Image (cartoon, rainbow, N blue to C red):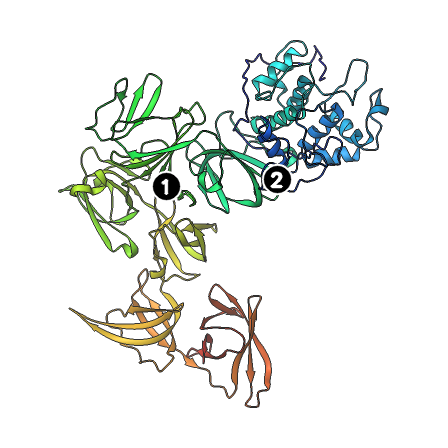
Amino acid sequence: METGDPSRPGARPSGTRAGRGVAFGAAAALVAAMAFGLAPGALAQTQAGPPFSDISGNPDAAAITMLASQGVVEGYGNGTYLPEQTITRAEFTAIVVRLLGPRAQSAAAALADTTPAFSDYASIPTWAWGDVNYAQGQGLVDGYPDHTFRPNDPVTSVEAAAILIRAIGDTAAVPSGTWPADYTLAAYDLDVAQGVTFVANLPASRGDVAQMASNAALLSPTLEPGYVSGTPTGAPLYFGGDGFAQVAWSGTVSGVTDANISLANAQGAPLLSGAPLASSYYLFGSSNVTTLQGLQATVVENSAGKVAFIQAQAGTSSQGGTLASATVGTPSGYTRVSDFVVASGTGDGLLLANGTVIPLVSTTSNGGTSFYLNAPTAGASADAHALVSGVSNLADGDAVTVTLNSSGSALAVYALNTTQPYGVVSSINTTANTLTYTSGSNDQTSSTVTVQSWTAVTLNGAASSLSALQDGDVVAVQVVGGGNGGDTNARSIAATRQTISGTVASITSQTGPAGTTSVFGITETNGQTTDVTADPSFDAGSIHVAVGDAVQVVLDGQGEARLLQSLSPQQTIVLVQGVQTQITTTTVNQIIVNNAGQNVTYDLAAGVSLPPAPPAGGYLAMVTFQPGTSAVQSVTPLAQTDTQYTLKVVSDSGGYALLQEYGSNGQAVGNPLVVAQSAGAVVYSGTTYEAFGSLSAGTQVTLWVNAQGTYLGILES
C-alpha cells in the first residue's frame, strides 16, 4: 500500500540517480486528464507558446507540455496550470487509471456506481468512485491501516511514486525494507523521481506529479515485450495499457521537413520514418523544426499517429571539416586508432585534417554517436542508403559536418563519402587485379578500379576476393581519396549476388527522398509475393515489364532492385508517331512513339522491317520487346473500329470512364461503354486497354482492335 506495508515483497536493493529534466529513453501512452477539479477533456494544441500561461521557465514545463499535447493534462478556466499547487489523492488516482489506457478507463467507468470499500467512502468524490475502485482492485492503492482512503489529502511524493511503480509493473525493483524508504529507493532507481523535488512524506506539487507521470511512461523498460533495458530495439517501449495508440520515441533526427520527422537509434537503424506532424504541435529546445537535423530528440505521437510534441536536447551546435589522412600528426594526449580516429584516456574522437579532435559520445552514454553517409541538409529526409553504424564506412579525406552536444562531443556525424552509387560488374581481370563496373542511368558509365591486397572485398556481407566475383554482381565501390588525383585503388568493394525470380504481380510507384521510384510485387514459386523497391540507379523506364511477366530481380546491398531481367517476351501498346532509319556504321531502323506525353525512340532489332509510316496523329501498334532490353523485335499495327457513330467520353470520375456513341443528329445511340481506369491503363471486362490522350468529358475518341477484333486501345480522334 502506498502508506507502507512491511510484508510487501521486494526483489533487489537499488542505487539512486537524481537530476532534473525529462529523460529520453522510450515511449509513452498516456490517457489521463489532470483536470484537478475540471471534467476530463482534450486540450486544443497550439504552436503559439506554452499550453498554459504560468509554466514558462518552470522546470516541469516540458513534462507538462508533453502531457498536454496528448490531451492528458488540463489547466484552469483562466488558462493557468498552477504547477506549484498540490493535488489530492483522489485526483492522482484518476490520473494513474487513465494512464493505463482505454480498457482500464472502461473498467473504471463500469465501477462508477459501486460504493468504494473504504470506511470513509462518503468523502470520496462520486466522480472518482470508479477510478478508486479500479485502482484498489488492481492493487495500485490500499489505503491506510484504519481502512480509510483519505481522498482529499494531498498526495505525497512517495505515495505518487508507489502508485506509478505498481501501475507500470516494476514492483520487482522495490527493495526489501520499510515504508517509505523502500519505494523512495525504487523511485530513484527507476528514474521515476528524476527531475523532481522528492521529499517522501511531503505533498507533491502538480508539476512534480506531471514530471513523475512523464518519467514513468518514458522510462519504464518493462512494458514492451522483448525490450532489453538500455538497448533500443527499434520499437517504442511503451504503447500504454492494452495497446493504446499514443506513443513516444527517442533518438537522432535523421530527417525532418515542415511536414514530417524521422528518427534513428544509436545503431543507425530507423526508429520512426516520415512521421507526419500534427497541424499544430509543441516544440521544445529549438526555434524551428527544420533545424533539428542530427539532434537527439524525443518525439511523441498522438492517438491519430501525428507528432504533437518534440523536445530537442539542449546545447547543441555544429562543426564542419575534413577527416584526417595518415600524414596528419596525432595531437598531444591522443593515440591514433586509424587514419581519422584517435583515443585518449577518456574515450575516442574524430581527428580532422586541421588537427581538431571531436570526442565521440560513448555507446554507454546517451546512446552513442550516430553516423550518416552522404547525408542531406536540414529540411530534407535522410536517404535510407546513407544511414550506417559506426565509423567503418568513413574514409580519410571525407568532408564531414558534426552535430555537437553541450559538452562538445559528437551527437551525429554527416559525411560526404567516397562510396560510389551501386554499379554492375561488367568484367574482371584477375591478372591485372582490376574490376570494371557500369553505373549511372542505364549503366552507361564505365569505371575500372584496381584491387590491392589491402582492399576489403565482401560478397553478400561475407569476406571474399576478386576472383570470387562474377559479371552481373551488384557492387558498391569505395575509391581511395574519392579518385582525386587519378587514384583508382579501391578501398572496399561490397558485392551482392541476390536474386528474386517470379511473376510480376503489381507495378506501383512511391515518392521518397531520392525521388519517385518503382515498386515491383514479385510472386515467387512458393506463392509468396514480395514487394521490391527500385534502387535510385535503377532505370525502370528503359525496361519494359508488365504485370504477368516472368522476371528475375537482382538486388543490391540494401535489398533493392538494381537490375530487372525479363524472362518472357514483353508486349505493350504504343502510339507510333514516326519511323526512321539511322545509318552510322550499321543501319538501324527505329520507331518514334508517344510514351506518357513524351516522344521516345526505340531501335528495331536486327532483321525487323520498318513498319508503315504513320498518318497525322499516328497509329496504335502492339510492340514486342526482346526480354530485358528496349530493342523491339516486332511491331503489329492495330486497326480503328469501323463504326458509323461518333464515340465520345461522357465522364471520367471516380476512376471510371464512360464512352457513349452518338448519331449524326447528336442523339445518344445504345448504352454507354463503361471502362475502369487504373495506373495509366483502362481495364474493361478483363481485357486491358491502353488510353492515349485526354479522357476528359466531351473528348471524341476511337477504339482500336487487333486482327482478332479485340479492343486494345483508345485514342483521341
Nearest to the observer: residue 553 or residue 484: 484
Instruction: Say whether disc 1 or disc 2 marks the residue closer to the N-terminus.
Output: 2
- Residue that sits furthest to the right in the current view: 122
Kind of element beneath mark 1: loop
Nearest to the observer: residue 365 or residue 691: 365
Q: Which residue is mark 1?
A: 375
Going 60% across and 40% down the picture, which residue do you hit?
A: 302
Work out which quarter of the rendered image holds the N terminus and state it: top right
Is residue 43 placed above or below 120 in the rendered structure? Answer: below
Q: Is residue 624 left or right of residue 204?
A: left
Q: Quarter of the image holding residue 548?
A: bottom left
Are there few (<14), some (14-19), or many (20+) residues within 10 Å of tag 1?
many
Are there few (<14), some (14-19), or many (20+) residues within 10 Å of tag 2?
some
Q: Which mark, residue 245?
A: 2
Work out how far the residue at label 1 is from the one at label 2, CA to CA, in angstroms. Answer: 31 Å
Going 60% across and 27% down the picture, which residue do you hit?
A: 60
Q: Is residue 126 left or right of residue 661?
A: right
How far across and down, in percent of the image, does residue 144 sit?
Answer: 77, 15
- Residue that sits furthest to the left in the current view: 431
Q: Amino acid at mark 2?
A: Ala
Q: Quarter of the image holding residue 668?
A: bottom right
Q: Amino acid at mark 1?
A: Ala
